[in-house]
Amino acid sequence: MVKKSVVLSIVGAVVLTIGVIMAAMSILNTDSADLKADDPAAMETSQEDVSSELEVPEKGDEGASTSDVPQRPDCPPGPVAGVELPCLGGEEAGDEATDEGISLVNIWAWWCEPCREELPYLEEISQSHPEWNVVGVHADANAGNGAAFLNDLGVDMPSYQDESNLFAGTLGLPGVIPITLLVVDGEVQEQFIQPFKSAEEIETSVTEALA
C-alpha cells in the first residue's frame, strides 16, 4: 500500500508540473502577441522586412500616355525623310510637308546634355531661315519628359516622337545623338554627327552642303 501511494504521489506531481508549464507558455504567448500589436516599432520593423523583399519598379522607364504629354507646337505633315512618326505633344498641321523642300531634322533626347546646348541654336535657325523646315525627332520612349524638356528650354521647334528607334533604324543612322540631317525633298543629303556649338555653325554647314 505504501509503494502504491508513493507511485500515485509521483504521478500526480508530474501531471501538476506539466499543467503549470503549459499554463505559463500560454500566458507568455499571449503577452508576446499583445506586445507586437501595441508596439509600433515592432510593426514598422515587420513592414520594412517585407518591403525589402519586394522589387519596386523604377518610375519614368515607360512612355507617358498622351494625356501626360505637355502641349507642344503642331508638326508639319509627315513623313520625315520617308519615315512616318507621330507629333510630340501636338498634331500634324499646315500645308507644307516636312519632306518638301529643305529640312533640318535633329535627333535628340531629353537626357542628352549636348542636346540641351544645341537645341536653342536650332530654334534660332528656324526663326532666321523660315524657308527651311527645322524639326526634331525625340529618340526616347518617354514622350512626357521630351515635351517638358523642350518647354523648359523655351524651344518651340516642332518635334516628332520616336519611341522605338524606328527613325534611326530605318535610315541606318549610327547609335549616337545628337545627329542633324539635311533632307532635301525627302532624301537625306548630309549627316552632321556632332553637336553644333552655335547657330552660325549650323548655317554655315547647311549652306556649304547645299552648294
Image (cartoon, helix red, strand yellow):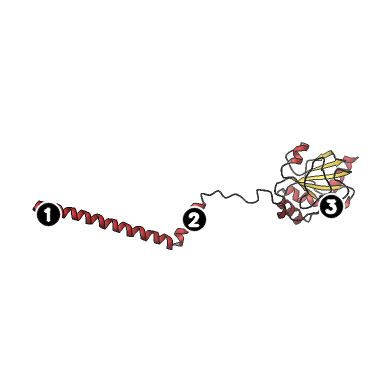
Report whether residue 46 is seen: yes
Q: Which of the two discs, 1 and 3, labels the residue nearer the N terminus?
A: 1
Q: What residue type is disc 2 on?
A: Gln
Q: Secondary structure at mark 1?
A: helix
Report whether residue 173 is seen: no
At 86% from the left and 53% from the top, the residue drawn is: 127
Number of other residues with Cα within 10 Å of mark 2, as a class: few under 14, some 14 to 19, many 20 or more:
few
Question: Where is residue 175, by image quadrant?
Answer: top right
Q: Which of the two discs, 3 and 2, labels the residue nearer the N terminus?
A: 2
Q: Residue furthest bottom?
A: 38
At 10% from the left and 51% from the top, the residue drawn is: 3
204 or 161: nearer the viewer? 161
Number of other residues with Cα within 10 Å of mark 1, as a class: few under 14, some 14 to 19, many 20 or more:
few
Q: Position of residue 112 (x, y in %)?
A: 72, 48
Would you name the residue on which mark 3 appears? 124
Say which mark, if any, is on residue 5.
1
Q: What residue type is disc 1 on?
A: Ser
173 or 93: nearer the viewer? 93
Q: What residue type is disc 3 on?
A: Glu
Say which mark, if any, is on residue 150.
none
Q: Which of the two discs, 1 and 2, labels the residue nearer the N terminus?
A: 1
**Left or right: residue 186 compared with residue 60:** right
For marks 1 and 3, give the CA distance: 112 Å
Q: Mark 1 or mark 3: which is in front? A: 1
> Where is 174 relative to 6, above or below?
above
Q: Secondary structure at mark 3?
A: helix
Would you name the residue on which mark 2 appears? 47
**Left or right: residue 61 compared with residue 52:** right
Q: Position of residue 25 (x, y in %)?
A: 31, 56
Q: Are marks 3 and 2 in contact (CB under 8 Å)?
A: no
